[in-house]
Image: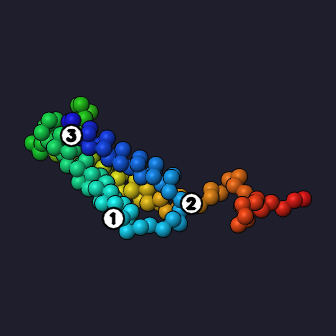
């Protein structure tokens, strides 16, 4: 359980550092070879954490500590009882299927968040629509037409 919580915290901190760095780095700044190597290693490690470590730790906790095994049925605290046990629900759902579904949900949410991070990184220098940013000339003076 500690490893699962720690992996989630490390992943969240790494993702937050991406946004912190994106707010400090102006768009269009040339990237050096060293910065590209550090960025690629960082992106690989973040991807490894998101798609490798966190789901693995979830499955380990679910199966070992919480006994989400294939021989136990999901009954939702007595609300869903399968027909094989005399209930109304038409099929059996094992706890392993529930834990695997949660792992798949982790992958889907992580993929969506990674795509959002990529979009935010690529559009970090663009002005927001409807913002009060006044364009400036090359000399730094505002380009405002006087009426």
Relative to residue 58, is residue 128 depicted above or below? below
Viewer can see residue 81? no
Q: In terms of depth relative to the viewer, which is nearer, 11 or 142? A: 142
**In which quarter of the view is residue 127 placed?**
bottom right
Dot 2: element:
loop
Q: Residues within 10 Å of mark 2 (few under 14, many from 20)?
A: some
> How many angstroms separate mark 2 from mark 3 (CA)?
37 Å
Residue 92, quarter of the rendered image = top left
Above or below 20: residue 33: below
For image coordinates 77% across by 62% down, the residue present is: 143
Q: Nearer the viewer, residue 19 or 54?
A: 19
Q: What is the count of numbered marks?
A: 3
Q: Which residue is mark 2?
A: 125
The front one of 55 and 144 is: 144
Asked if residue 104 lies left or right of residue 121, the reply is left
Residue 141 visible in image: yes
Residue where numbered disc 3 is placed: 3
Viewport quadrant of the N terminus: top left
* Circle number at residue 37: 1
Q: Residue at x 53, y 66 (%)?
A: 28
Q: Which disc number belongs to residue 113?
A: none
Residue 136, percent across and down? 72, 61
Density class for disc 1 (Cα within 10 Å; few <14, some 14-19, many ≥20) is few
């Amino acid at each position: 359980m500690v490893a699962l919580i720690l992996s989630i915290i490390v992943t969240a901190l790494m993702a937050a550092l991406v946004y912190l760095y994106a707010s400090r780095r102006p768009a269009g700044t040339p990237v050096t070879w060293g910065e590209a190597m550090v960025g690629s290693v960082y992106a690989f490690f973040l991807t490894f954490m998101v798609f490798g470590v966190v789901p693995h730790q979830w499955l380990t906790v679910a199966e070992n500590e919480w006994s989400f095994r294939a021989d136990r049925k999901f009954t939702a605290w007595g609300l869903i009882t399968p027909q094989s046990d005399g209930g109304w629900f038409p099929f059996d759902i094992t706890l392993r299927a529930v834990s695997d579904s949660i792992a798949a949900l982790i992958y889907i949410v992580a993929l969506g968040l990674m795509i959002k991070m990529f979009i935010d990184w690529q559009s970090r220098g663009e002005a927001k629509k409807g913002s009060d940013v006044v364009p400036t000339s090359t000399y730094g003076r505002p380009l405002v037409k006087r009426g």
